[in-house]
Structure formats: structure tokens, C-alpha cells
Amino acid sequence: STSSEPYDVVVIGGGPGGYPAAIKAGQMGMRVACVEKRGRLGGTCLNVGCIPSKALLHSSHLYEEAAHGWGPHGISAENVKMDLNKLMAHKDKTVFGLTSGIEGLFKKYGVDYFIGSGEILSAGEVKSTPIDGGEPSILKTKNIVVATGSVPASLPNVPIDEKVIVSSTGALALKEVPKKLIVIGAGVIGLEMGSVWRRLGSEVTVVEFLDRITPGMDTEIATTLHRIFKKQKLQFKMSTKVLEASPKPGGGVVLKTEPVKGGEAETMEADIVLVSTGRVPYTEGLGLENIGVKVGARGMVETDEHWATNVPGIWAIGDAARGAMLAHKAEEEGIAVIEQIAGLGGHVNYGCIPNVIYTHPEVATVGKTEDELKAAGIAYKVGKFPFMANSRARANADTDGLVKFLADKETDKILGIHIIASNAGEMIAEGVLAMEYGASCEDIGRTCHAHPTMSEAFKEAAMATYDKPIHF
Ligand code: FAD
Ligand code: NAI
């Protein structure tokens, strides 16, 4: 079918970048359509990313606590059982509920939803080919927002079959708890999914190319985190290069590795191997090359600072464009690009995007790392406070971690905040807000925080940059 009246915006991709863009456009009274080929809205994040992983992280944490974690409180449970099918069913139900919710929001705000594969025919035309093989629709439009996301990066000689050699998608849906799990890559996915399966009973070894975990993270925080994970019996094989992985005829996988610095090759075996060595933008089959949209390294759509590509009327956001591959970053861009299209000057402050790893404890950061400040030659002060000295953490028997503030040496303005704590992901919001408002550490240190809360450690770490904390 061909509709004569053009859309104001057609969004390709219904993930955390695309669906908020479509909703925002609808809310602003634009004529808008969203083309999504998955059959469900919500993209990677809701279907095979953020949400299912957080369901499994929470369920597996509850299980581990019940089985081994209540000792300090004088509580023990016998015969703690875990039903993997039910645990997975909770995850699936959560995902289904949330993705259906977005369909409801599309109806509420007048977004036309096309279940199909989108291809850009020209700057003003998108073809949506239904995934069930029906007639394609040609959508005429004034603007096209590319929000097609990302897919797992592949590793040479490690063929992902989603059965024994899996990406995060397979790791979110294993049918049984593997006895042995090898994780390739000590980044966010490796640590989150490695933690899930270790808690559920797997022996987990993380193989990492570098000599540190979580590259890019503040080195002191990463080192502390590494120590905590080792204490939790997550095993690490650092500075190790994976040469190849192959499924064994009777089940399981053989992995060949060698030390990065050279030396004897080694063989490891496992029931399951998880490949988590990063993700790459997904722009295949979109037709970008047909109309001359500039696509950079690894398929990333090139844009200016307001998400405009080199072809007028074509925009790109989220994982398919530059910057951190995070759902909330994609969402901010989704809203801002629509404001931009509407001529309202949409803006995203990339210096204030929080980053959270949802292990236990959690790690949450915003702003600069100490390594970055050193490299840039910026004079800074450090303020730290350990949860060992926080009354609430002590009462909860949950004292792993610290808060670390980095502030400008002259002005005390906050430059970066790094937290390891069981609730770091929630706690960081205060820091992001403070940075958005250009706060100094003293602004936080002189703000009353309720007692007894973990957030008092946040305040006291801020006090430590310009004075002394009271409790340490
Ligand atoms: P996506 O979510 O990838 O959505 C793109 C959509 O476009 C997909 O549904 C795809 O089917 C569709 N599409 C692609 N091409 C076409 C086409 N030609 N036609 C029609 N449709 C198309 N981020 C966080 O912030 N917090 C987390 O806790 C977190 N956890 C994660 C856990 C895992 C295991 C993974 C893999 C990722 C996680 N992420 C997390 C990252 C987050 O999922 C992504 O940053 C986010 O989904 C990016 O949003 P997006 O809209 O750009 O792309
Ligand atoms: P990542 O970039 O976080 O980590 C990849 C790790 O693999 C790094 O430590 C890297 O040094 C290592 N590596 C790369 N090549 C290797 C090789 N050949 N052999 C051994 N190690 C190798 O990527 P990951 O974990 O796959 O996650 C992808 C992205 O998804 C993240 O960058 C993040 O943007 C997003 N994500 C976000 C989450 C969150 O916000 N909580 C959760 C999960 C994913």
C-alpha cells in the first residue's frame, strides 16, 4: 500500500532509541510511524538485553542470598531450591509485559507501528517489508530516524551457534545450569552474565585479553571490583588471547588460548562458552549506501552533534550512531532528535551519562575517571569513603565498596563520581543531577542526607575532597 500524505517522521528500529523518539513525535502532534522487524517493540534492551539480564541478576541474587548469604544475620535456610524454568518464566513474563506496554503507548500517542524490515529507498521513502511475507508498504516521509541498534561483535574462529557457543542472547536463555562456563571478555556483559550463572551454580572462568577488567573504567575502581569478584569465586584468566573454540561431538566446547605475551598454547573445556567482547552497530540491509549516507568504521552511521547525517532529513541515534552503547543514552537522543526535527534545539550532555554494572555490589560511574584527568593534565582532588565506615551498610552486613569523588583542585567542581555499592545504580542519580547543575563537592557535603542511609557515604566522600569526613 502507498499512502499519499507523507509522515513527518519514520523511525526505523523500535528499541530504547527508536520507540521514545516515536512516542515523543506523537506527543508533539507529528504524523509518525515506527518500523520494527523483531515482532516485538523494545529492541535489544527489553527483549535480549537490559531487562531480561536484570531479571536474572535479581533472581540469582535472591537465590544466592537464601542459600549462602544470610549467615551474618543469624538466619539460615535449608533445602533452598531453584527452579530454572520458573526463574526463566519470570524473566519472559517481565519482558512480555513491558514490550506489550510500548505497543499500548504507541496506540495512546498515535504512532503507526509497522512490523517489518525497513529499507531506505530515498531521503523521503522507507520500504517496510512485513516479516511474515506480506505486501511491502512504502512510507513517504519528511524525516527518517535510523535507530537500528547493535549486535554482538564476532570473534574469529569462535563460531556462535547460540547452543554451546553463545552470545548474551543465548546466555539469557540456557536450558540448564552449565557445570562449567567460560566467558570471553571481562566487560559489562561478561561480568553480569558470569555473575548470574556463578550464583546459580556454574564454575565460571572469565578469559580476558587485557591485564585488567572493564577497560575504560577508573583503574582504582576496576581493581577493587576485580578483587571483590575473585572473593565471590569468579575465576579470571587475564592477558590471554583466544585462538579458537570448537564444539565437541559429545557436547561442550574446547577452547584454545595463548598468553598475550607469547608462550605455550593451552586448551580449556567447558559446557558453554559466552562470547562478550563488545557490540557493533547494526546497519546492514538498510540501504544507507544507496543514498550516500556516510557510514564509518564497523557500520556506525556518522552524524553531527545533533544526530544529522550528511543527507538532509536522515538522522541516526542510539547504538547505531556514535557514543556509549547504553539504553538511557539512546533514549535521551531519541527525544532530543525529535526536538531537533521540530526546530526546538534538542540537546544531550554527553559528559553526564551514567554507566552502571548491575552485579552485586553494583558499580556506577559518571564523568571523568582519574586516569582521564591525569592524561589531560587537569589538577584534581580525590575524596573517598568506604562502606565499611557507613552505619547502614554495617547494619545490612553489606559493606563491600566505596564512593570516590574527583573534583577540580581550584574550584572543587565535581569532575567524576565512582561508586561501588549494592545500590550504586540508584545512588548515582544524585551525582548525575549534581553534575548537571555544575555542583561542587561542598554543595553535596553541605546537603543533609537521611540517616542511616548508604547515601551518607556519598555525602562523606564529597566532604573528603575539601575537608575531612566525620566517620572515617
Ligand atoms: P536496539 O535496542 O538494538 O534496537 C534496535 C531495533 O531496531 C531492534 O529491535 C532491531 O530489530 C531493529 N532493527 C534493526 N534494523 C532494522 C531494520 N532494517 N528494519 C526494522 N527494524 C530494524 N544498556 C543499559 O543502559 N543498561 C543495561 O542494563 C544494559 N544491559 C544490557 C544487557 C545486554 C545483555 C545487552 C546485549 C545490552 C545491554 N544494554 C544495556 C545496552 C542496550 O541494550 C543498548 O544500548 C540499547 O538497546 C540501544 O538501543 P537502540 O534503540 O539504539 O538499539
Ligand atoms: P565491553 O566492551 O563492555 O567488554 C568487552 C571486553 O572484552 C573487554 O574487557 C575487552 O578487553 C575484552 N575483549 C575484547 N576482545 C577480546 C578477545 N579477543 N579476547 C578476550 N577478551 C577480549 O563489551 P560487552 O561486555 O560485550 O558489552 C557490550 C556493550 O553492551 C557494552 O559496552 C555496553 O555498552 C552494553 N551493555 C551495557 C550494560 C549495562 O549498562 N549494565 C550491560 C550489558 C551490556
Image: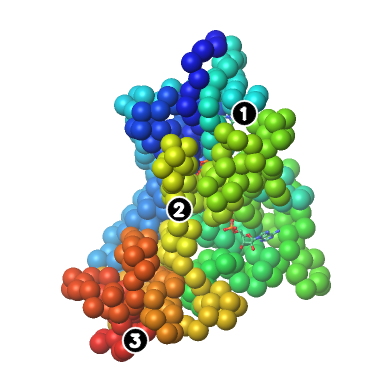
Three-letter code for the amino acid on which mark 3 is drawn: Tyr
Q: Earlier in the sequence, mark 3 or mark 1?
A: 1
Q: Position of residue 82 (x, y in %)?
A: 38, 49
Marks 2 and 3, Cα distance to the nearest angstrom? 30 Å
Residue identifier under label 1? 123
Residue identifier under label 3? 466
Residue visible at 58% across and 17% down?
A: 138
Left or right, residue 330 beside residue 321:
left
- Quadrant in which the C terminus is drawn: bottom left
Q: Secondary structure at mark 1?
A: loop
Q: Quadrant of residue 216?
A: bottom right
Label disc, if present, on residue 243 of the rendered structure: none
Q: Position of residue 246 (x, y in %)?
A: 74, 48
Q: Position of residue 91 (x, y in %)?
A: 40, 41
461 is higher (above) or lower (below) than 126: below
- Quadrant in which the N terminus is drawn: top right
Label disc, if present, on residue 348 of the rendered structure: 2
Q: Secondary structure at mark 2?
A: loop
| Relative depth, front residue between 417 and 26 | 26
Left or right, residue 403 beside residue 165:
left
| Relative depth, front residue between 46 and 313 | 313
Three-letter code for the amino acid on which mark 1 is drawn: Ala
